[in-house]
Image (tube, rainbow, N blue to C red):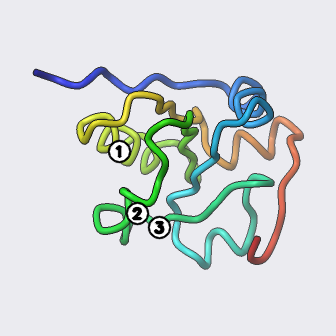
């Protein structure tokens, strides 16, 4: 049985999901995250993702984010393929989030 396909959400939709309790998961590497990240995002680098994905709560909506949306789409589909059901990908990634004027942070959360 094939898992569902990952859905993309706009930065504004992603922000609404986070405000409603979703967890924003940034899959970039630490140096990229420190440069700029969507406010409230937790870091789970793609390089460690397969070893650590089980740390993510299955019962909570997850919004995946990276720089432009490609790596987070891979990570999100991996979650769907491994039993997660409430996962979406932030279209355009951190670049689109920042371009939309949504809050960002620098350094470690």
Q: Is residue 76 above or below residue 38?
A: above
Mark 1 crowdedness (10 Å alpha carbons): few <14, some 14-19, many ≥20: some
Q: Which picture quadrant has residue 4?
A: top left
> Mark 2 touching mark 3, by CB under 8 A?
yes
Q: What residue did someone put label 3 on?
A: 45
Q: How many marks?
A: 3
Q: Is residue 65 above or below residue 89?
A: below
User: Which dot marks residue 74?
Assistant: 1
- Precedes in sequence: disc 1 or disc 2: 2
The structure residue drawn at horizontal position 37% and vertical position 71%, both measured from the top left corner, is: 48
- Precedes in sequence: disc 1 or disc 3: 3
- Horizontally, residue 11 falls left or right of residue 86, namely right
Mark 2 crowdedness (10 Å alpha carbons): few <14, some 14-19, many ≥20: some
- Horizontally, residue 104 falls left or right of residue 24, namely right
> Mark 1 touching mark 2, by CB under 8 A?
yes
Q: CA distance from mark 1 to mark 2?
A: 9 Å
Which quarter of the rendering shows the C terminus? bottom right
Q: Secondary structure at mark 3?
A: loop
Q: What residue did someone put label 2 on?
A: 46
Mark 3 crowdedness (10 Å alpha carbons): few <14, some 14-19, many ≥20: many
Q: Which picture quadrant has residue 60?
A: top right
Q: Secondary structure at mark 2?
A: helix
Percent x, y for residue 92?
60, 37
> Mark 1 touching mark 3, by CB under 8 A?
no
Q: CA distance from mark 1 to mark 3?
A: 12 Å
The structure residue drawn at horizontal position 52% and vertical position 42%, both measured from the top left corner, is: 69
Which quarter of the rendering shows the N terminus? top left
Pick the front one: 89 or 81:
81
Q: Is residue 103 above or below residue 42?
A: above
Percent x, y for residue 51?
30, 68
């Amino acid at each position: 049985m094939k898992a569902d396909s990952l859905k993309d959400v706009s930065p504004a939709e992603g922000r609404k999901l986070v405000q409603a309790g979703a967890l924003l998961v940034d899959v970039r590497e630490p140096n990229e995250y420190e440069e700029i990240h969507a406010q409230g995002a937790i870091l789970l680098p793609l390089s460690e993702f397969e070893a650590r994905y089980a740390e993510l709560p299955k019962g909570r909506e997850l919004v995946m984010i990276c720089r432009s949306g490609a790596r987070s789409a891979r990570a999100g589909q991996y979650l769907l393929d491994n039993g997660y059901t409430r996962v979406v990908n932030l279209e355009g990634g951190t670049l689109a989030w920042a371009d939309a004027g949504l809050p960002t942070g620098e350094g470690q959360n």
